[in-house]
Amino acid sequence: MDCRTARLLLHFSRPRAAELGTAEAEALHVHLAECADCGALAHAERRADDRLGQAMRAVPVPAGLRERIRERLAAQPLPWYLQRWPQGLVAAAAVLVAVGLGLSWFTGPRTAIDVEQVCELAIDQVGAPPEKVEAWFGERGVKMSFPRELNSRYLTSYELVQFQGQPRVPRLQFERDQVRLRVYVLSARQFNVKGVLNERHQSGGFTVEVRPDPDNAEGGYLFVYTDGSLEMFRAAPPAQA
């Protein structure tokens, strides 16, 4: 299953909904477990659904609203598509519509986007030296080792992301000659790194490799790159004295 299909099926895989067949649901579950981007998107959508549900349940229904709705419905003929519904269901549906309309006018605090700051951050991250990258993650409470085998000149960005169900995983992104490389810094506290060390997998134009961290016997790096070779991102060997 590709990302486009998975993101389309996300709309039909809401909790307590049975709109997907067993095979599609299983394929989607496998894809979300293997794809960091789609997994993060699914997590964010489910979290938004949960918060919206909590907000709707927390909205108080005005006293006497149910009775007023019933009186109004009794005073006028129902549309043909509601005439066969039990009266209780009609009233309940009307209450939900009223609550939904009330919520549509509510918006919580929204953060203003500082476009200039975003631009400055992007510029600041390009080609950052390893020590600066490690310090950035350290300021956010995450200790990591920059993969010294890679040339930081090709670094384009770095951030903390959710990966394989674990929050706050360091991710570095590199690019050279239209070949892209994504590196996840794996901590032994979050992952069983030894179980996949030195594995290599190719599919759909991507190559995935897991290599050890020379500075941490329990940790490692997961490399994901497009058609090309990891060698093109290697750091130059130290000059001979």
Image: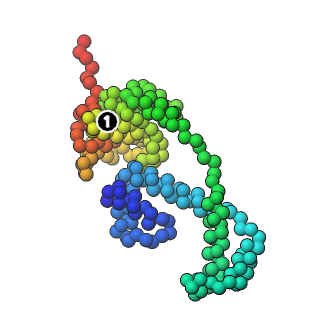
- The picture quadrant where one finds residue 113 is top right
- Name the residue rendered at 40%, 50% in the picture: 37
In this view, 230 is above or below 37: above
Task: State which quarter of the image contains the C terminus.
Answer: top left
- The picture quadrant where one finds residue 234 is top left
- The foreground one among 143 and 86 is 86
- Name the residue rendered at 66%, 78% in the picture: 91
In this view, 234 is above or below 80: above
Q: Position of residue 133 (x, y in %)?
A: 43, 30
Left or right, 165 with respect to 175, comes to right
Q: Position of residue 38 (x, y in %)?
A: 40, 53
- The foreground one among 83 and 164 is 83
The residue wearing badge 1 is: 175
- Name the residue rendered at 49%, 56% in the picture: 45
> Label 1's element?
strand
- The picture quadrant where one finds residue 96 is bottom right
The answer to whether residue 240 is visible is yes
Q: How is the image coloured?
A: rainbow
Left or right, 86 with respect to 61, comes to left
